[in-house]
Image (tube, grey):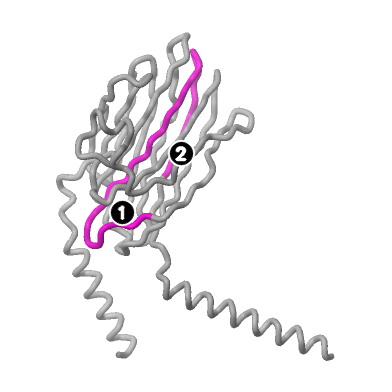
Amino acid sequence: MNLFSKALALTVLTSVVLMCFPSQGSATTILALQQDSGSITTVAVGSSLSSLSFNGTYGDFTITGFGSAADNAASLSDMFASAVRVVNNSTAEHTLRMWASSQDYTLPVTTGLSVESGMSGTVNSGTLVATFQAYADKGNNLAGSPVLLGIVASCAACSDFTNGLQTSVFNGSTFDTGSAVGSFTRIAGQPFSLTTDRIFTLSGGGSANVASHENVVATPEPSSLVLLGFGLVGVGFAGRRKFAALKLQ
């Protein structure tokens, strides 16, 4: 089979796979909040893979400029979430938990995916303890669960994939969880969902700015890794021959 025939076959195969994906018309992106392990409230709902925003008060907190955006591209699917500022209006310490979740990610088309996640920000006043966790669900459920309220708190159905709990490390007034990477296997021909989970414990009157991300790319195929290995071996062999020739001079 010549190169043109291979390219044509790959194009047809990709088109068939994409046609198997369900419509994104009924998909949803949500932002859910919880204070001090209390009830969970969905405060914003939008179309999947589009922007989601929230400005307002929730319990003892004011959230200014929260935004969520998601991409579904051939080489990279992601979900970016930010809160320009989270303020604890109380004089007592409180904990705010924020979930952003989006359905109907279909790309990259490969079943083996690599997920990278992280969170960073700054503390404007008071003290903060912040953690972050990213999830993926091959069942395409919001927050990894068919029913958000009451189940999302533990994200029990998110066990399909998580990079694990990421704890913020402080450098002065800035904090960063660093970057975590893990492998996720989705169901071939089926969409999947992504969820991010942020927990902020702020002292009374404290405020912080924060942003987080969850990026999905294709995991290199084993054949590609083998070819890369052969290439590295070849480079090493050539280097050894050149080094031996130099020694003989």
The rendered magenta stretch, by its main secondary structure, is classed as strand
The residue under the point 40% across, 23% down is 96
Which badge, 1 or 2, is on the more N-terminal residue?
A: 1
Screen quadrant of the C terminus = bottom right
Pinpoint residue 45: horizontal percent, then vertical percent: 23, 34
The residue under the point 23% across, 29% down is 149
- Give the numbered dot on residue 215: none
The residue under the point 15% across, 53% down is 23
Residue reaching furthest top?
91
In the foreground, 114 or 212: 114
Which stretch is magenta?
184-213
Q: Is residue 79 left or right of residue 243?
A: left
71 lies above or below 249: above
Pinpoint residue 209: horizontal percent, then vertical percent: 48, 29
Label 1, secondary structure: give it: strand
Read off the residue under disc 1: 72
- The kind of residue on which mark 1 rests is Asn
Screen quadrant of the N terminus = bottom left
Pinpoint residue 33: horizontal percent, then vertical percent: 32, 26
In terms of image quadrants, where is residue 188? bottom left
Q: What is the distance, in whole Å, between disc 1 and disc 2 at their CAs?
A: 25 Å
Pinpoint residue 125: horizontal percent, then vertical percent: 55, 19
In the foreground, 51 or 219: 219
- Give the numbered dot on residue 165: 2
Instruction: Check residue 232 for magenta coloring.
Output: no
Q: Is residue 206 left or right of residue 33?
A: right
- Mark 1, Cα crowd under 10 Å, few <14 / some 14-19 / many 20+, is some
In terms of image quadrants, where is residue 50? top left
